[in-house]
Image: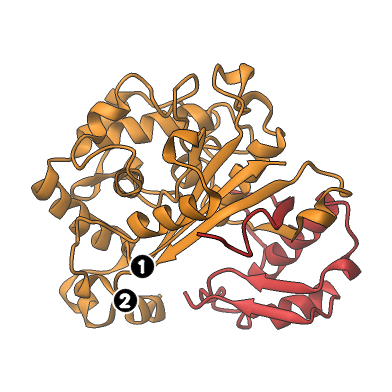
Chain colours: A orange, B red
Amino acid sequence: MATMLTAFSGDDAVFGHFGATGGYALAARRAMYEFGTGPETWKKIAVGQRKWANLNPQARMYTKPMTEADYDNAKWVVEPFRLPDNCLITDGGRAIIVTSVERARDLKQPPAVIMGMGQQHPSTEVAQSTWMAGPTGAEKAGAMALSMAGVTLDDVDACQIYDCFTYTVEITLQDYGFFRPGEGRDWLEGGTIEPGGRTPVNTSGGLLSEAYFMGLTPISEGAMQIMGRCGQRQLGPVTHTKRPEIILCSDNGGVLQSHSCILLRRL
Amino acid sequence: MTSVLKDKYAIVGIGYTPQGRVPGRTSLSFHLEASANAIADAGLQKRDVDGFICYRHFPAASDENDLTPSRIAQHLGISPTYIYQDAN
């Protein structure tokens, strides 16, 4: 534990600042000031993703529905984050196999083809961030991935966003360009990301409500959805959503210091 | 942007393990189980695997050896020609 503290937080721990929640809480606070976000926005992400987890038998929160009132009544971890703003801590592992499309054609599963990818890493540590409230690396990484794939955001049928905190989902979608700064709350209104919504997000429940396997949680779910293997949470008629042609997956490191974006499609 | 990566590669297998609160397991055992399940899910044999990439390099549990791709590959019984691991 002492190693974790000093390796990841250095001298900051002496002043009571340690762990990921504190760092992201700082960034989220700045975003509240910069573009007027806050718990009213994040609540829709936490509750929306929980609805997906309630359709996923292997999700940690499968049997635990969450209402907006549950969110409002949850305890603070580090203000402005309540417990449901934080991802889970999970024992377990996750792995994926990648091969050429040529070879994939002869294998057992329908392949999830990688049509575009991008990365950007705007700073090396949060104390050196130029813009703590974004744009994060998602802006350029997303543009790079879309450009490589030759598609636009309008072509993206669903997203699997690295969601260490609810705010991470908001700033990532915002920096990709799904909505303008501060307009996330309106964009999320009416169940946009939920089962039946027009842009489903984190359909396994994500890091917040399925399990924490870092970037492997979003990318494995993206691939499983493209493969059509998701049972009662499968995108398409079962969940009153569009059958996915293209799914966007993200990963993010540090306190919004590094970002990866990958676009998957059906063969 | 033209790219040599576009549409050339695909994800073809996913490996899950028991997840949640799973006491009595080592970090290494989860790496091995997830990898073996992913290989089986793709319908491949472990001898087909010629590259092995570990995700972020977090510290293993305090009573375990450092987890590197070469260590995991050895325990998995594969000899990849390419290994890689992210810094945390």
SS at mark 1 in the image: loop
x, y percent for residue B30: 69, 62
Q: Dot 2 surroundings within 10 Å: few (below 14), some, or many (20 or more)?
A: some
Residue at 49% over, 37% down: A156
Check contact, mark 1 vs mark 2: CB within 8 A.
Answer: yes
Name the amino acid, label 1. Gly
Q: Left or right: B42 with respect to A84?
A: right
Name the mark on residue A119: none
x, y percent for residue A217: 56, 50
Name the mark on residue A254: 1
Q: Which is nearer the eye, A11 or B37? A: B37
- Which residue carries the number 2 mark? A124
Name the amino acid, label 2. Thr
Q: Nearer the viewer, mark 1 or mark 2?
A: 2
All told, the count of numbered labels is 2
Q: CA distance from mark 1 to mark 2?
A: 8 Å
Residue at 38% over, 22% down: A191
